[in-house]
Image: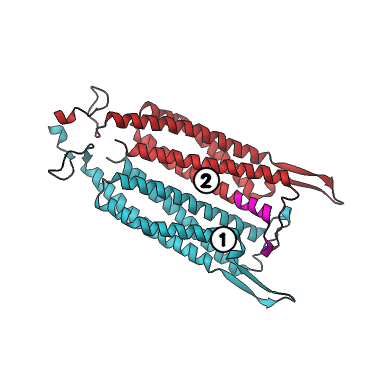
Chain colours: A cyan, B red
Amino acid sequence: MAKTDDVEIGEPGAKLPATTTTRSGTGLKKALSIFDFITRVCALVTTLAAAAAMATTEQDLPFFSQFLQFQASYDDFTTFSFFVVANAIVCGYLVLSFPFSIITIIRPHADGVRLLLLIVDMVMLTFTTAAASASADTVYLAHNGNPSTNWTGICSQYGDFCQQVSGATVACFISTVLFMAMMAMSAIALRQR
Amino acid sequence: MAKTDDVEIGEPGAKLPATTTTRSGTGLKKALSIFDFITRVCALVTTLAAAAAMATTEQDLPFFSQFLQFQASYDDFTTFSFFVVANAIVCGYLVLSFPFSIITIIRPHADGVRLLLLIVDMVMLTFTTAAASASADTVYLAHNGNPSTNWTGICSQYGDFCQQVSGATVACFISTVLFMAMMAMSAIALRQR
């Protein structure tokens, strides 16, 4: 009997669960869930900032040519349109995931919910990574051009445009890191008994 | 005592572990570990194929201009160089991860190893996703160009080059999916007691 003294078995009077859990494990799981929730809020802020910064990107040059006014907008690039859509989807998911994250705080042993969050977070991680890196690729080309293909950089003319787009890309990379942190926390919590 | 009859406690004679485990859980964990190993081998094949296909991409056009011969090589694009490096790193990691994957087959309850694999797999997932999507972005521009920036498509001239680069990108996207499968299996196995 002495062996089971340090073991807590759910609520008293509840039926014996299939797994027995230690008190320190419960505390750690709860702490990780709280951190997960905080990280999730931060990720919402960064993805929202990325989507908003990208979607409002537009620059008119302060002169006219003989034929047209020069203007750069995010939707001139398919990549940047994808960036906005992907970040909007991730934002929507993050809002929907808040209740599930709260469930894992209230019930630290709700490992099914945690597993679900981990797997959908993984899908969203690939979304943000894909958006951020494709956008970074286009920003790189816009800055430096590519001499082999005669693609010239446009950032010398459209400085503000490039700066705003780069900012949005950086925000998206920060979301990527936050998603990785959330997934690592979920995995560590899943391992705890 | 009747309660613990359906519970298997490690090897007989070993000291009582902190967690108690069911036989069906052990079987599932073992099966998932075996699938993980198989998926890992497939991922090695696809990343190796992606890296090799990209690194050998080169096309000379069958005519000379007045001044130079037209030639396209993967290292004309920074993105494609990154693609090769990222895929090579992932290949190296996959080879190094085989012993760890085998450990989880032999000892299905080695959850520490499984957690380690899950977290490093996550980092490698972002690598492959970033490489694949940045490369897809460049391939898209090479195919379609971008009228707003006067970037013209080059695939009408360099058809073979574009085809091989697209193939490598697709192989890399397949690795991404395989990594996601591996991570999902690791997470499900971690949840099992």
Say what secondary structure mark 2 lies in.
Answer: helix
- Of all residues shown, which one is farthest toward the right? B66
| Residue A174 screen position, x and y as percent | 46, 56
Q: Nearer the viewer, residue A12 or A171?
A: A12
Tell whether A7 sits left or right of A31.
Answer: left
Res B127 label: 2
Tell whether A79 sits left or right of A86.
Answer: right
Q: Which residue is mark 1?
A: A80
Q: Main secondary structure of the magenta part?
A: helix
Looking at the rendered structure, the kind of residue marked 1 is Phe
Looking at the rendered structure, the kind of residue marked 2 is Phe
Occupied quadrant, residue B187: top left
Tell whether B36 sits left or right of A131.
Answer: left
| Residue A187 screen position, x and y as percent | 36, 44
Do the residues bearing badges 1 and 2 touch, measured as CB atoms within 8 Å?
no
Q: Residue at x 68, y 77 (%)?
A: A63
Q: Which residues lie in the magenta part? A: B136-151
The image shows residue B120, relative to residue A76, as above or below, that is: above
Labels 1 and 2 share a subunit:
no
